[in-house]
Amino acid sequence: MTSSAGTPARPGGPGRALILGALRPHRRLSAGAVGYGLLWSAGKLAVPVLLSAAIDRGVGRRDEHAVLFLVAGMAALGALTAYAAGERRFRAEAVAYRVEVDLRGRVYAHVQRLHQAFHDATSTGELMSRTANDLQQIRHPIVNGPLTIANVVMLLGSAAVLLAIDPLLAVLALAPCSLLVLLARRFRGRLSPAVTTLQAELGGVSTIVEEAIGGIRAVKGLGLEGAEFDRLERQADQVYRAGVRVGYVRASYQPLMEFLPAIGLVFIGWLGGQRVASGGMSLGGLVQFTYYLLMLVNPLRTTGQTVAQLHRALVSAGRVSQLLRTPSQVTDSVTPRSILTSGAGRGPAQVRFDGVRFGYTAGRPVLDGIDLVIAPGETIAVVGPSGSGKTTLASLVSRTYDVAAGSVRIDGIDVRDIRLAELRRAVSTVFEETFLFSGSLRDNIAFADPALDLARVRDAARLAGADDFIEALPDGYDTEVGGRGRSLSGGQRQRVALARAVITEPRVLILDDVMSAVDASKEAEMRESLKAVIRGYTTILIAHRAATIALAQRVVLLDGGRIAAVGTHAGLLATSPRYRQVLAMPARQQEPGPRTAGSPSC
């Protein structure tokens, strides 16, 4: 599977650079892990020397004191290597988890900054795969990195000692083992594409699970539980096939990795035994030689696992690096300006659209030549059929998207020249589909500034008409909401969202069809809440119900991406046949349908 986040990156430069860059801030802790790994290797390399001396000088000469002394030395080395192994593991784990946390923070922050078009075209499951599965894959070789370095040192040290003891026997014993290097390169070439496919298929599973859980009401409401299970089962089967392919590649090479070192032991038993029998080598020397060769076996056997881990990490790091290198189309200006010191300062702002043109895909404008001025404190209602550009028009104010031509200005300043954080604090939006975060109702209302006291939270809730129902709950403002607030009614969620929007005292308030989830019995009550809320703000009200539209001083009729008419609700009813026709449309023809990548929004 692929997404707009890109085809899974091939391992190599970007992935390697990402891992090395992430390790750089933790180089002291990493160096400590490597240092203890080298101490572990030194202790291991010293043991055969003491063992050989114990056999030749102690056992061979029947010197009990030498045996006791040398055995005590081996015990001390054993304790030292055990301590070094523990310290190496602890420091490596600490570095690995620190790197994972750092990268997860970088990915999360970058994804938050990416433009909305990226999120429109990229599944949530794919992004979750990048921040979960891929980052975990990166952690594994970091944990084992110091051990791998220690193993390399032990391999080189053992090989050097073997050559020093008996060059001919060393060559015969090491020749089969050296083939493991070539074997590892071939193994890497076959494993890398298999792992890439597996990671992509795992992202597909994450997408399906995320969609099924996020849309659980639709799934249950349409009786699609079986269909969703079948869809997941098909994708899981793809994961199984990809996983079996990875397992097959590993299993194909594992027997050779087990067999090749054993050939070296055959040569030692044959030629080394002859050397001892002829007096060319002591028994202690043969034991020492065998010990060093056996010390090579385990690192050589783990070569395949090490290579597999490294390449899984490089593939995953390549995917994460690719995401981090995805540029945002909406960025801060090089010389940003402030709207907090312009115009009315903290009061309602003027919003101006000058020749605005915008489309989600080239050559297909959703808005074409929009000229509109909204006075400070004015409420306008934007009305039009589905696809006319209502939501798109409002989203340009907060730079959810950037205009293709023309400009959107707040108090005369182009929104592209305003720092994004400041702009989006000054422009609050309440969407048709209300999203509540996990936590209490108080946490949700004060989400933009958790330090706000309860009095401010209550004031905002009272303004939005939410205070009464919240106080009636068993835990009041401390009531926990879960599952996106599904325990609350649609109208209750909308009031909480209204309170969340106004608590920051924005300069512009955008209400995107907020009455759509309110049942008829609560519509009048909700409308009164809206009337109270919009009184102190410059408000863009996207609506299709006549009673809601009537709250606005002016109505803008959008049709085909252009302004077809502007006037009061009563005036347009009297003079615009198209306006009357739009209001007479069924609600479903005015409300936005499901968004797809590149499709026009309302």
Image (cartoon, grey):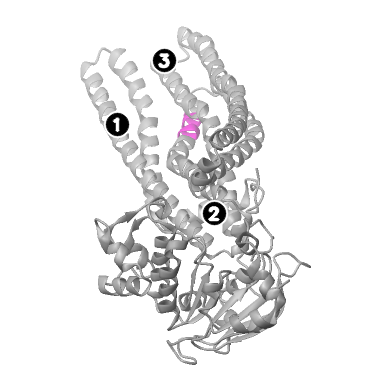
Q: Which residue is rendered at x = 47% and y = 54% of the image? A: 103
Of tags 3 and 2, which is closer to the observer? 2
Marked residue nearer the N-terminal end (1 or 3) = 1
Tell me the kind of residue under disc 1: Leu
Find residue 49 and report its horizontal and vertical position in percent. Answer: 37, 26
Q: Which residue is rendered at x = 38% and y = 44% of the image? A: 93
Marks 1 and 3 sit apart, C-alpha to C-alpha, by: 24 Å
Question: Per the image, is 159 magenta?
Answer: yes
Marked residue nearer the N-terminal end (1 or 2) = 2
How busy is the neighbourhood of tag 1: few (under 14 within 10 Å), some, or many (20 plus)? many
Find residue 505 and report its horizontal and vertical position in percent. Answer: 40, 79
Residue 288, quarter of picture: top left
What segment carries the magenta color? 154-161
| Number of dots carrying numbers | 3
Q: Is residue 355 visible?
A: no
Tell me the kind of residue under disc 3: Ser
Find residue 219 and report its horizontal and vertical position in percent. Answer: 53, 42
Mark 2 falls on what kind of element? Answer: helix
Label 3 sits on residue = 282
Tell me the kind of residue under disc 2: Leu
Mark 1 falls on what kind of element? Answer: helix
Marks 1 and 2 sit apart, C-alpha to C-alpha, by: 38 Å
Question: Is 376 on the left-hand or right-hand side of 237?
Answer: left
Which of the pair 156/517 is nearer the observer?
517
Marked residue nearer the N-terminal end (3 or 2) = 2
Q: Which residue is rendered at x = 62% and y = 53% of the image? A: 5
Overall secondary structure of the magenta section: helix
Label 1 sits on residue = 77
Find residue 547 and report its horizontal and vertical position in percent. Answer: 52, 73
Label 2 sits on residue = 18
How busy is the neighbourhood of tag 2: few (under 14 within 10 Å), some, or many (20 plus)? some
Mark 3 falls on what kind of element? Answer: loop
